[in-house]
Amino acid sequence: MNPSASPDTLRMAAATFASLLDPSKSMKIALPVNQSHTFLAINVNAFEPVAEFKRRMDALARQIKDAPKAKGAQRIWLPGEQEWERRAAALSEGIALPQDVRDSLKGLGDDLGVGAAFLGDTDHASNSN
């Protein structure tokens, strides 16, 4: 899975958000995106007891995880697992920012007089009101 978004995806997202915030600013997307999304909300209990559903889903997840791995693969990922692991790592270790972003944030903090203690800059921490 490639975590970076393509320029076309970013253009589509920008157009969508722009039109939500101000319909007069909406952009026309000239190229096809060839994707769609569907969201469902299902009352599992209408079909079977929730405990039974959870048992079956756990068994399915185990079956998928125990399947033979593709050549060179070390692990089989279930949907959302990578994101949950990255979230847990970010919560415990923080988020690594590229140096140019750190420099930009530090400069912004300096300009506003608020410092950037979250970047390890404690020069302004004692000066804050």
Image: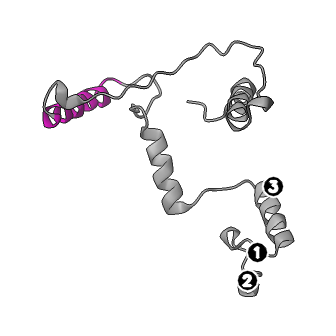
Residue 73 percent across, percent down from the top left: 45, 29
What is the number of the mark on residue 43? Answer: none
What is the number of the mark on residue 100? Answer: 3
**Viewer-nearest of discs 2 and 3:** 2
Q: Residue at x 53, y 61 (%)?
A: 93
Query: For the C terminus, which image quadrant?
Result: bottom right
Q: In the rendered view, would you say 127 is above or below 93? A: below
In magenta stretch: residue 61? yes
* N-term-proximal mark, 1 vs 3: 3
Residue 56 visible in this rendered orientation of the protein:
no
Residue 111 percent across, percent down from the top left: 86, 70
Q: Quadrant of residue 22?
A: top right
In magenta stretch: residue 56? yes
Q: Residue at x 67, y 31 (%)?
A: 5
Q: In whole angstroms, how far apart are the C-alphas of marks 2 and 1?
A: 6 Å
Would you name the residue on which mark 1 appears? 114
Q: Which residues are magenta?
A: 50-68
